[in-house]
Amino acid sequence: MTSAGASVGRLVVCPTPIGNLEDVTLRVLAALREADVVACEDTRHTRVLLERHGIATKLLSYHEHNERARAAELVERMRTGAVVALVSDAGMPLVSDPGFALVRACIGANLPVEVLPGPSSVMTALVASGLPNERWRFVGFLPRKAAERGRLLERAAETLVAFESPRRLAGVLEQLSGSDPDRQVAVCRELTKLHEEVRRGTAAELAAYYSEQAPRGEVVLVVGAVGVSASGSGISGSRPADVHRADALAALRELVDAGARARPAAKVVAKLTGASANELYRQLTDAPRREDGEAR
């Protein structure tokens, strides 16, 4: 708790288990025990963790609907010496979870912010995927609109890590399979929990599997960069033409997005890359028609 002579408090950002309660760190438990208040998404959920470890610190709800108002309140508490521990329901706060407004408010008020290391479904999935991790990008939840999602996936020059709803997973894999069936993918489901599953394969293989086997629980999707082989060694020597066409199509999309007319732009890209102008134009114009019938 706050010492008697303290005049300024601080914020301690505490990652919590993503499934298995035994994954909480000793430092996080100490911070939760010593804090004056724990700001959490769901007090009922966090209370389970605290009661398991005999911690009786006061809980205060802090979620997306009251984040800004609560941040101002907590900053005032810290100004008078309170130590606030911030947790989310699972994993690291702020990573697709509430907390950004509070951290920014603390920085603006010159209050100390301490971030403790701990469980993260993003890092766990990235390592478990077996895909290259020298360059990678976390994109949060994938865009719900098919066109926007397609542009993101088709232009990826690095491994992508994303959250996805189990209800939309099959559709996302089907979309990716339609544009790049050999793309390397890993579906990481229910990480650290009893029914944990990490399924690796091509987009086509996983699209076929999940079209028959509806997934349940929390899903982290890891998608290899365009042209990464199954061994993860980089560009696959067995299918350079596929990679070449994907790069050419990505270049054409960028030109069209910048205002160029599709047909002339396709001819320019074809001349520079050796790809077929007609094939590039067909792939570009077919995509919107395929997306019209897709769910978000």
Image: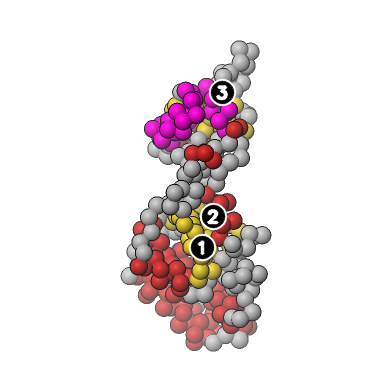
Amino acid identity at mark 1 = Ala
Check disc 1 and report the residue beneath it. 186
Check disc 3 and report the residue beneath it. 34
- Is residue 92 shown to the viewer in this render? no
Amino acid identity at mark 3 = Glu
| Crowd class of label 2 (few under 14; some 14 to 19; many from 20; radius 10 Å) | many
Of the image marks 3 and 2, the number of the one nearer the N terminus: 3
Image mark for residue 170: none
- Where, quadrant-wise, is the N terminus in this rendering? top right
Where is residue 156 shown, x and y percent of the image?
56, 66
Q: Is residue 3 above or below residue 193?
A: above
Going 38% across and 70% down the picture, which residue do you hit?
Answer: 291
Check disc 2 and report the residue beneath it. 125
Q: Which residues are magenta?
A: 28-57
Going 46% across and 53% down the picture, which residue do you hit?
Answer: 196
> Are the residues flagged by discs 2 and 1 in contact, CB closer than 8 Å?
yes
- Is residue 282 shown to the viewer in this render? yes
> Looking at the image, which residue sits at the far top?
4
- Nearest to the observer: residue 58 or residue 248: 58
Instruction: Say which element carries label 1.
Output: strand
Where is residue 246 shown, x and y percent of the image?
55, 76
Of the image marks 1 and 3, the number of the one nearer the N terminus: 3
| Crowd class of label 1 (few under 14; some 14 to 19; many from 20; radius 10 Å) | many
- Nearest to the observer: residue 268 or residue 71: 71
Q: CA distance from mark 3 to mark 2?
A: 31 Å
Q: Is residue 36 magenta?
A: yes
